[in-house]
Image (spheres, helix red, strand yellow):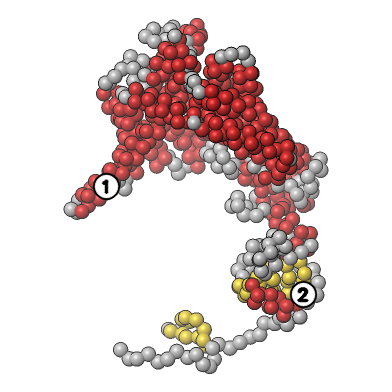
Amino acid sequence: MSGRRGAQMAEDASTPDKGWPLRTWVLAALGALLALAIQQIDTRLGSDPAWRDRLAPGLGFLLGVGGVAFGLIWERGRLAFAVSAALVAGVIAAGTFLWSGMPGEARLGPDWYLTCGLLASALMLVLFQAMQDGHGATVPSRSFAGLRERLGALRYPAVHGHLWSNALLLAASALFTALVFGIAHLLAEMFWLVRLGFLRDLLRESAFIAALVGAGFGAALGLLRDRGPIIAALRRVTMLVLRVLAPVLAVGIFLFLGALPFTGLAPLWETGGTTPIMLTGAMLALFLVNAVVGDASEDESRSVVLSASAAALGLFLLPMVGIAAFSSGLRIHQHGLTPDRLWALTFIIVASVAAIAYAVAILGARGWFARLRRTNLHLVFLLAGLGLLLSTPLLGFDRIATSHQLARLADGRVSPEDFDYRALWFRFGRPGRAAIEKLATGSSNETVRSLADETRKLTDPWREGPAERAARAGHALDERLTILPAPVPLDEGLRARLVRFDACGDVGDCLLHHVPGEDFAVVVAYPARSCAGCTPSVRLIWTVDGVWSDASQYLAEGDVAQAMAARIRTGDVVIRPIVRRQLFIGGEAVGETLPMAGNVPGKPDAP
């Protein structure tokens, strides 16, 4: 009976008080005010970098996440509880910015700090909602004993139900808001047809847009919460549809795992993307297992095929997580720790705990569906606590990874030429940038100082770093380069120019015709030997004020390039001055140059 009662609470969680229009009006007004406040914070206080990078987005997330959480949890007569839960969710999300700064600040790539903060906020809110359902009309005391009473009243159907209901409510509210925004623009254009532009002008104001979006989202959330049975029915239909995918994924993973003894594991390690793919597959498998298991015994699938598929998917978690762990371990052994690898290692540990717990639940005696639901409830607490911890700088993955990479450089496990300075500058956060600054000014190794100094001048994370450029322009280039009319030493500027995509590139043989002292060179880039149908290309490169220009002139490709390359090998390459004519109007050159004779444009007829 407790499972059924919890499921019923979850179904009615969105609106135990039917027909409460006051909540809709309050949420609409609150949404408009909060959205306007967030917009004003960004507009009026966003010019100061220190404020913009930390306090402004933190306050914005406090208001935004807290407001959404309040709209999801507020019930009649429980205003204080709703405000408390909203503050907890908002403070967790806002703390991520106060501790870690803006996403991408001195750190390229996914911002897992923010992701963990939002995950912790969402799960904490779900637990608050389930606790609110668990005590019904009674209100436990505001003490540790009262908190324990609330936690003891938690039921998996309520937790799982609120998790799904919140996701559906937010998605539907966002869709409603987009529809409101579209209608506003349509009305603006209709009024503009009769030369009334007031609505058009309003929709150009960021403050009005913020208020409109906030009011639309809040109103939608209130209206949908008054229709809880519809959301519950939509949730059940979604789960029923997702169950059908369980056998498909189970068969696919079974075939994949069965093929590994024949293909070997080597292809997995060569891809470089094994860990995220395996973890994504494991997460999807876990998701579909729970679609089959349901909220309570009444929701369990009675199909033998679906039950067997869910059991297989739960057991497949172990080998998939094992492959991800081995792949990540290989990368760490080869290239050392990075923040991304530390995050991957953390996710692997969490996935391993879930995989072992699922295997124990499935391989036990009868009734593994119920055991799996109890396991999920424990995992929710684990994920909420771990997400909260990881959203803070207490573990300091950037700092740990930076120290490890510097240790590898210091003890010679990686040479100064092979060290990834650019990754340290762009992907390791503030500790990485501080390390590059220290290497550029205080390293005893001249090569390290030079490469670190060049790295800290980079502003574009996608531009090639000095270490990578030096490696490509060194021995790797010499092995595939032929210099005509005679082998001569090449200066560093020409070497760096040759390895660009419009010269020799990265693969294939390369023919260079260059005489020291000349301000030009002819480059014949041959395709990789593995490309049977590919042909070479010929380009001209030159210097500007003594520096090799990034520009190039395309000369030929295909059969023409083959014939031209043969003539280049004979040494018949020369630049000759020519005389051409140029049109001047008012003392300024106009148009293209003309040959000295012939091809003169005809005299146009007089108008």
**Which quarter of the image is occupied by the N terminus?**
top left
Q: Earlier in the sequence, mark 2 or mark 1?
A: 1
Q: Quadrant of residue 224?
A: top left
* Numbered tag placed on residue 484 in the rendering: 2
Which amino acid lies under the numbered mark 2 shown in the image of this protein?
Answer: Leu
Find the distance from the CA under tag 2 to the CA under tag 1.
Answer: 68 Å
Which residue corresponds to the image point at 81% horizontal and 72% vertical from the top-left?
A: 487
Q: Is residue 240 at all visible to an observer of this figure?
A: yes
Residue drawn at x 69%, y 78% as measured from the top left: 563
The amino acid at mark 1 is Leu
Residue 38 in percent (x, y) is at 39, 36
- State the image coordinates of residue 250 (x, y, percent, origin top left): 58, 32
**In the image, 270: left or right of 248?**
right
Is disc 2 placed on a helix, strand or loop?
strand
- Tag 2 and tag 1, C-beta contact below 8 Å: no
Q: Nearer the viewer, residue 534 or 425?
A: 534
* Residue 494, visible in the rendered structure: no
Which of the 4 quarters of the picture holds residue 439? top right
Q: Residue 395, located in which quarter of the rendered image?
A: top right
Checking the image for residue 341, the label placed there is none
Residue underneath mark 1:
186
Q: Tell me the quadrant of the picture where the C terminus can be found.
A: bottom left
At horizontal 46% and vertical 85% (from top left) the residue drawn is 584
Query: How crowded is the residue under tag 1: few (<14 C-alpha within 10 Å), some, or many (20+)?
Result: some
Which one is nearer the viewer's eye here, 169 or 294?
294
